[in-house]
Image: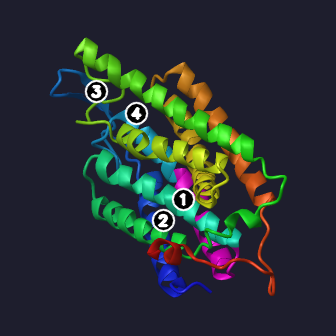
């Protein structure tokens, strides 16, 4: 059992409880007030949700938030608890699943804290962001990074995973720059800004997800142990976030929000590919057995050198 297992179990349990509250209110507190019209400081008119938890957010952002709350409540939280259960059994699958699922919660609630209009769950979002970060770090410290490559069979689709990471990172880079760069030349707000003052999703994706995607693909190409770890975390994150993205597209369609056709097609395809590769990674993962010779050097010891 990992050194910080009990502390981690408590933190993850609190995350699950707070996420149930946050996602549950998002799903079941809808309200019936009509949409309102808001004129931004840039002179654009935006449809505001007008009711429910996301009453001060745009219809587009609210529909995405509600759809993601559905995925978090009925998929994210159960997966988090299952991952914790496997982690407590000292299974590598559990450690990687927990790290990847926590990465989803970290990404999600940082965005909720910064990107949604202030509401009664603001402190819940802050707590979820903070707890997810610390739980993620503790989970990584329990992984035997140096011995990680030994746990994968020769049938692991390493090249496919590398290709997927490079393509996903490149698509995000091109898609988001395609919104931002023209705004500089046209002297207009970028697509998707609406009633927000900045682009929170693009900050996270361009500043974190894209570089980590390229780094994970490159390190896996070089057969680095850290490449296996980063790639596994990215795939498990795609497993959950990819499902959420598909739900967001459906939610926006129901709400009558206009979407770019390329994004509507590419995002679900990437999500599907990520889910398939995640399942293949799990299938080709070998657990260490009692008495098996495995180089046990947790990440915390490697970082100390």
Q: Is residue 86 magenta?
A: yes
Residue 111 visible at all: yes
Do the residues under discs 4 and 1 have CB atoms within 8 angstroms? no
Q: Is residue 249 left or right of residue 183?
A: right
The quadrant of the rendering that contains the N terminus is: bottom right
Name which of mark 2 and mark 3 comes first in the sequence: 2
Identify the mark at residue 60; answer none if there is no mark.
Answer: 4
Do the residues under discs 3 and 1 have CB atoms within 8 angstroms? no
Name which of mark 1 and mark 2 comes first in the sequence: 2
Which residue position is annotated with label 1? 73
Do the residues under discs 1 and 2 have CB atoms within 8 angstroms? yes
Q: Is residue 63 left or right of residue 2?
A: left
Residue located 46% across and 22% down the image: 258
Residue located 36% across and 66% down the image: 130
Q: Residue furthest left?
A: 41
Which residue position is annotated with label 3? 46
Q: Is residue 280 left or right of residue 124?
A: right
Name which of mark 3 and mark 1 comes first in the sequence: 3
Name which of mark 3 and mark 4 comes first in the sequence: 3
Q: In terms of secondary structure, where does tag 4 sit?
A: helix
Which quarter of the figure has residue 187? top left
Residue located 37% across and 47% down the image: 31
């Amino acid at each position: 059992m990992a050194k910080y297992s009990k502390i981690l179990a408590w933190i993850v349990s609190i995350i699950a409880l707070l996420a149930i509250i946050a996602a549950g209110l998002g799903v079941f507190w809808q309200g019936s007030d009509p949409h309102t019209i808001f004129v931004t400081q840039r002179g654009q008119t935006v449809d505001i949700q007008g009711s429910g938890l996301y009453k001060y957010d745009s219809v587009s952002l609210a529909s995405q938030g509600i759809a993601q709350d559905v995925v978090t409540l009925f998929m994210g939280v159960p997966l988090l608890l299952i991952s914790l259960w496997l982690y407590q059994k000292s299974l590598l699958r559990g450690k990687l699943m927990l790290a990847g699922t926590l990465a989803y919660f970290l990404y999600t609630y940082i965005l909720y804290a910064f990107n949604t209009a202030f509401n009664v769950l603001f402190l819940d979002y802050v707590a979820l962001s903070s707890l997810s970060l610390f739980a993620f770090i503790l989970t990584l410290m329990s992984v035997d990074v140096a011995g990680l490559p030994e746990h994968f069979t020769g049938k692991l689709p390493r090249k496919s995973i590398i290709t997927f990471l490079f393509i996903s990172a490149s698509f995000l880079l091109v898609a988001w720059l395609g919104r931002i760069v023209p705004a500089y030349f046209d002297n207009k707000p970028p697509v998707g800004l609406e009633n927000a003052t900045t682009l929170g999703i693009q900050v996270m994706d361009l500043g974190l997800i894209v570089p980590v995607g390229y780094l994970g693909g490159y390190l896996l190409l070089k057969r680095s142990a850290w490449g296996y770890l980063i790639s596994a975390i990215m795939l498990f994150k795609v497993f959950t976030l990819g499902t959420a993205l598909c739900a967001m597209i459906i939610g926006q369609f129901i709400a009558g929000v206009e979407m770019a056709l390329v994004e509507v097609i590419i995002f679900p395809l990437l999500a599907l590919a990520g889910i398939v590769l995640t399942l293949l990674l799990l299938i080709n993962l070998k657990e260490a057995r009692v008495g098996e010779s495995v180089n046990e050097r947790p990440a915390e010891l490697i970082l100390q050198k």
